[in-house]
Image (cartoon, rainbow, N blue to C red):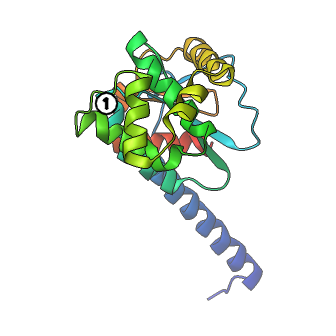
Amino acid sequence: MKYLPKAFVLIFLITVFNALAKDSVSRSEPALQAGIDYKIINPAWPTGSKKTVIYEFFSYMCPGCNAFEPHMEQLSDQTSEQHEIIRVPVSFYPQWEPHAKAYYALKMMGELDKVHKSLFAAIHQFKKPLRTLEDIGDWLFASFSIDKQAFLSTAESFAVDNEIRKANKMVKTLGIAGVPRLVVDGKYLPDFKQLKTADNIIEATLYLANK
């Protein structure tokens, strides 16, 4: 019996191992098709970040956004330091604008993280009539001892108005027709209807964020 040189055997084993590893990775990745599972946005929205930005378009008044919030937490848990999640509150209707302003005001005041989930719960779970900035201000003071006048002043500021205008421009430019929606790095728009389940949406978003 002839024996193959050790170097040849080693090269052969490395080649087989790499092929198997590549096949394993490809089988673990979702089989996504551009134009079907996600849309390529052209021109892409400039994120201005060195990280891969995942935009979440939402409204506190949207029941679907409330239901999707636990999945956003799941997405956040699975991202790395190379990713950044940025929420963008939309104002499709005049009734939604106070909540978009509240989002940016709370963010500027450094109060957003402790209020975000509770504001969803107050509206959808506890049915609080938080329809105006005054209503939201009263609730913030009662629930978190956040100064109402400071909140209202910030919510009606030029800085918040500027953020609202930017959000509205993003919605129009990126073709956001409903919420919740995710946009990856300003150029990939996962099709929620095609992907069907929240788990599929999160999986597809992570895949696109790592392309």
Q: Is residue 181 above or below residue 30?
A: above
Q: Which residue is mark 1?
A: 64
What number of labels is visible?
1
Q: Secondary structure at mark 1?
A: helix
Vertical arrangement, residue 11 with respect to residue 170, above or below: below
In this orientation, which residue lies closer to the viewer: 111 or 33?
Answer: 111
Residue sitting nearer the eye, 67 or 117: 117
**Would residue 184 be visible to someone looking at this image?**
yes
Query: Considering depth in this image, is 129 or 40 the residue closer to the camera?
Result: 129
Crowd tier of the residue under label 1, counting other residues whose Cα lies within 10 Å: few below 14, some 14–19, many 20 or above: some
Which of the 4 image quarters holds residue 202? top left
Q: Amino acid at mark 1?
A: Gly
x then y, percent, for residue 82:
68, 51
Q: Where does the image place residue 19, in percent across and percent down from the top left?
A: 59, 61
Residue 107 sits in quarter: top right
Q: Residue at x 69, y 82 (%)?
A: 4
> How far from the left and from the top, in percent, is residue 201?
41, 38
Question: Which residue is at a point 49% across and 43% down the rendered structure image?
Answer: 146
Q: Quadrant of the N terminus?
A: bottom right
At x 37% / y 43%, what residue is drawn? 142
* Residue 30 visible somewhere in the drawing: no
Left or right of residue 134, residue 173 in this image = right
Residue at (62% x, 26% y) in the render: 187
